[in-house]
Image: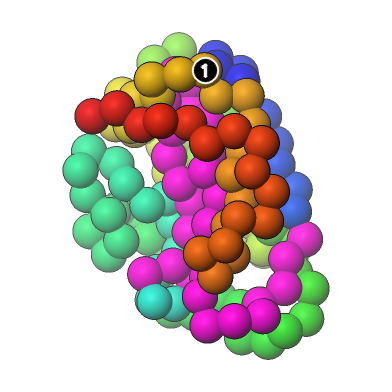
Amino acid sequence: MSGTSYHLRVQLRQLGKHGFHVVLPVGDRMTGFDLDGFGGKYTGTNVANGKQGKDLPGVVEGKQVNDSEPHDLEVTVRLDGANATITTTLDTRTLYEWTGPTAARRRVCEEAHFLLLQEDGVSLRRLLRPRMCG
């Protein structure tokens, strides 16, 4: 997926106390997106320019999923030269948006073609777990 814009749709359900995490290729970099991450306190990408959680611009505060019903999460990653835009919706409601240089994200040491989805710290489906570089 390196150098490719894409759209991801996943249906999820809150079964435990932890949030939902997905690893996203962003050009030749990677980032994670946390829904109700950081102990249920913040929703947004998890690291940019060495910042995380509440210190990231655009982070959404407060728990977003408050029941055990199915919810639709959609993530779009659009590349535009050296920049990227990451947008998310939850049940068609705009949730989070980040725009900035792809260089703000972690560099990937090996080609990433698949995603790692996690809930409660357990891999739901691991097709490839890319090794991150600085």
Nearer to the camera, 11 or 91 = 11
Residue at position x 38%, y 60% in the image: 59
In the rendered image, which quarter contains the C terminus? top left
> Would you say residue 80 is visible in this rendering?
no
| Quadrant in the picture for residue 14 | bottom right
Instruction: Answer whether residue 9 is magenta in the image.
Output: no
Q: Is residue 2 visible to us here?
A: yes
Is residue 13 depicted above or below 108 in this figure? Answer: below
Q: What's the magenta region?
A: 11-38
What kind of element bears circle 1? loop
Magenta stretch prevailing secondary structure: strand
Q: Position of residue 129 (x, y in %)?
A: 52, 36
Q: Residue at x 68, y 87 (%)?
A: 67
Query: What residue type is disc 1 on?
Result: Glu
Name the residue rendered at 72%, 73% in the picture.
13
Residue at numbered disc 1: 111
